[in-house]
Amino acid sequence: MTPARRQGSRPMLWISVAVGLALILTGLLMFPQLRKQQSDLVLPELKPYYQELADGNALGSPDAPLTVMEFSDFQCPHCQRWFRETEAAFIEEFVIPGKVRFVYRTMGDFLGPESLNAGMALYCAEEQGAFWPYHAILFLNPPARPNSGAYAPERLVSMAEALGLDVQAFEACLKEERYRDRAMQDQQDGVRFGVRGTPAFVFQTQDGRSFLLEGAHPITSFRQAVAQLLSSSE
């Protein structure tokens, strides 16, 4: 009886070994894919002032004589170009010296549902003190075309993970659409200021005057606008 029982147990042993090897092989095959998903993301290398000057979605002193609000859409190619070519120069020339307080606003679902996804994700990142790093990673990983999956929820969570955020908290925030109303209010405020396309920049003086500059203008256009508004308020 004993030999028969041993012979009967061998097939089960080989089945167990085979299942174990299959699980290991599956893991090995999946691991490069997981690594590839992470390597697909371009990570930001932010200058220190993005942390030193940050106040939520604003950069710079609240006592600055001018406030400039950018109304923007992460899916907009012109917004992406302004981020790459002009934003850093703008901050270094106007925000760091205390001339301007810079505020970033989304435009809700201006270019579609993934624009709203990105805006909500940005405000979820703000909860963890990562508004500006997340703003950067969104712009550094843009879609090839609008609403093509670049800002699908799972990829937005991957961006949060790549930045070292609390993924569980971020994912819960995004899933419940905690900041839908805030992102859509951005759009309403933009329209109220006369914004018709992105990016658009609303300049506000301390005495209540405002000026709208639409488009991905070079730094020279901002120099002229800032100089004119500061000189007229003296």
Image (tube, rainbow, N blue to C red):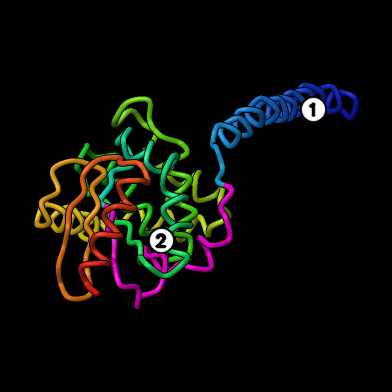
Three-letter code for the amino acid on which mark 2 is drawn? Phe
Within the magenta stretch, is there residue 49? yes
Q: To which quarter of the image does residue 27 belong?
A: top right
Judge left or right: residue 49 versus residue 99: right
Give percent across and percent down for residue 4. Answer: 85, 23
Query: What residue would you read off at disc 1?
Result: 13
Residue receiving disc 2: 94
Give amino acid for label 1. Leu
Label 1 packing within 10 angstroms: few (<14), some (14-19), many (20+): few
Q: Residue at x 33, y 32 (%)?
A: 77
Please report the residue visible at 90 percent of the width from the left and 25 percent of the height from the top: 3
- Residue 144 point in image, percent of width and height: 38, 25
Dot 2: what SS?
Answer: helix
Q: CA distance from mark 2 to mark 1?
A: 72 Å
Q: Which residues are magenta?
A: 45-70
Foreground of the two, 108 or 61: 61
